[in-house]
Amino acid sequence: MKRLAKFSEDLQQCKQAEDVFQLMQNYAKSIGFEYSAFGQVANNPASDATTVKHYGMVNYPAAWVEQYESQGLYRVDPIVQRGHEIDELFIWSKMKDSIQLTREEAGVLSAAVEHGLNDGITIPLHGRSGKPGLICFATSDERPLTPGTINEAHAMALLAFSKLDKMLMDGTAVSRLSKRQVECLYWTAMGKSSKAIADILDLKENTVTYHIKTAMKHLGTKNRTVAVLKCITAGAFHID
């Protein structure tokens, strides 16, 4: 419990999604999981296919990641399919007993083992984006996973996802801001008034006010400070 409390405390200091993943990865290693991954599952209506976006948050063996992506194995990966369909944690090694795998699905699991992913767990998660999220932890250890380790990893994943979900949602909104909107919020963060920002950017004061209000609307807030914090969290700019 002390270790989990420390993780929760450290989590509050994370400013970007990559920081959350690194913290989660380090914690996972401390309880026996060498590999970690985060991804969001989405259906592509145009091709009727399931895709996974991991934002670079995966530390599986490089050779496995390359094979997985180049061959589009997510289309037949039972971990992705099962995580997309259910709402509870599941253990990879027990999938063969709980569901009937196709030859292709069994092949994906066998290939993963060949690359050192002998067993693991997946925690399906649902956030504000509407896209199911998956956090996976894997190990090369051939010994069975213990209930204590599984429970601790589960709790850590829930904490991490609550932070990741907010960051990714904010990041998506921030990415839609115009260059001028970001500039206005940056100078707001530097303590400048709309009039001062107008002088700096050679704009009219009303125009600056309009850019800031529009940015706040995109970011879902009526507070300039919150808008600035969302930009900083999403990495739009940094304050030294």
Image (cartoon, grey):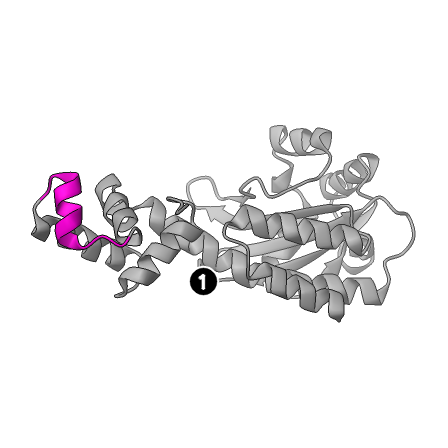
Residue 169 locus on image (x, y percent):
42, 55
Between 66 and 151, the residue placed more toward the observer is: 151
Q: Residue at x 59, y 60 (%)?
A: 11
Image quadrant where residue 128 sits: bottom left
Residue 44 relative to residue 107: left or right: left
Residue 81 relative to residue 117: left or right: left
Q: Looking at the image, can residue 43 be seen?
A: yes
Residue 15 locus on image (x, y percent):
50, 52
Residue 49 locus on image (x, y percent):
52, 43
Residue 33 locus on image (x, y percent):
78, 51
Between 97 and 125, the residue placed more toward the observer is: 125
Q: Residue at x 31, y 61 (%)?
A: 225
Vertical comparison of 222 with 199: above or below:
below
Image quadrant where residue 57 sits: top right
| Residue assigned mark 1 | 128
Magenta part, dominant SS: helix
